[in-house]
Image: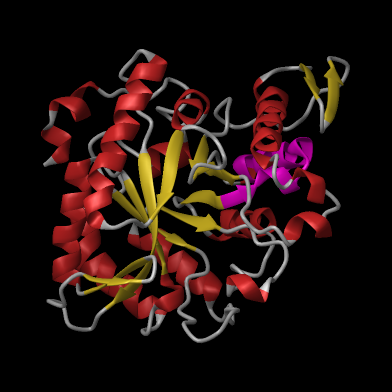
Amino acid sequence: MAADTPTAQTQLLPPQLSTHAGFSRMFKPGGLTIGFILPLEGYPNSPAPTMHDHAAVARYADEAGFAGVWARDVPMYDPMFGDTGQLYEPFTYLGFMAAITQRLALATGSAVVTLRHPLLLAKQAASVDQLSGGRMVLGISSGDRPSEYPAFGIESDFESRGERFREALGMFKASLEETFAVHRSKRFGSLDGSLDLLPKPAHSKIPTIVTGRSRQDLEWIARNADGWLYYFVNPEHLAPLVSTWRDVVKRETQSDVFKPFAQGMFFDLSENPDHPVQRIHSGLRVGRNSLIEYLYWLQALGVNHVALNLKVSRRPAREVLQELSEYVLPEFPSN
């Protein structure tokens, strides 16, 4: 198993994250955990979920022992992109999740930092982090929907959103990881040391997980983020992707620090437990027995977390979670 490989034995959690309630639940060297992209609902034929019974299903996910939930950031509905996300503003929704769950890591998947002022983003993320007992994990992206930029009055920054992304993350980190920070940004203003942003994170920092490339090179992501979340790719492309990530992290950090690789995918659990792995758009249709084999294969490659999106599920979410918790989750525990 992956946990017995030399790489898994030598990788170390950064001190700030070794006791982080959210990060350590979701990610561990050599291991793989299972989480979900919110909402916990199948709605294959509709752009918007009903959100019916979403709180009860989230409580079930928490009590069953899944690793975490990811809230997408879709501020405006664009029919060209097909869906609305989970409808609710992600930090408001994760604040609600903080109140109704005890153990789940609470992640954004992903916050479009280019459309948010970094100081407000920091205030939102730290508030959820404190309210949840330090379970906040910040997935971040540069946004890929051109129609949103004019709506926010920053259409001129769409092509330069990579630079905007770097600026936003720099101010975000400075405001949370420093006291009375001094920081200057071309786009977002300046901190001159006379103001402080409160609350600070429960564990001194909020881990950041970059989604996709976010208009950055892999070397920058390895230096500046705490992990990498990538979309579903063909199996033959996944192994070199994960291997490259591990190599780049080691080279850029000059250490064996653990920076996890996570994967998000659409997921449809077949009622036939032996249904083979079947590729669907950006994900899989599979039976539980084949899923277990597939997840062990991912773990051996070095994938540390899978975030399953139930939008395409033809079965009720609670039914899917119950089957996964009984047969699959014991093979990939979060603790």
- Residue 103 in view, yes or no: yes
Give coordinates of residue 79: x percent, y percent.
Answer: 65, 76
106 up-or-down from 276: above or below: above
Residue drawn at x 74%, y 48% as measured from the top left: 115
Snapshot quadrant of residue 74: bottom right
Q: Which quadrant of the rendered structure holds the C terminus?
A: top left
159 up-or-down from 16: above or below: below
- Residue 257 in view, yes or no: no
Residue drawn at x 46%, y 82% as measured from the top left: 44
Left or right: residue 139 versus residue 292 is right
Give coordinates of residue 200: x percent, y percent.
Answer: 68, 29
Left or right: residue 311 versus residue 196 is left
Magenta-tinted stretch:
110-130
Left or right: residue 122 versus residue 254 is right
Q: Nearer the viewer, residue 311 or 194?
A: 311
Q: Which quadrant of the rendered structure holds the N terminus?
A: top left
308 up-or-down from 12: above or below: below
Q: Nearer the viewer, residue 183 or 104?
A: 183
The secondary structure that most of the magenta stretch takes on is helix
262 up-or-down from 191: above or below: below
Magenta span includes 334? no
Give coordinates of residue 209: x percent, y percent.
Answer: 50, 39
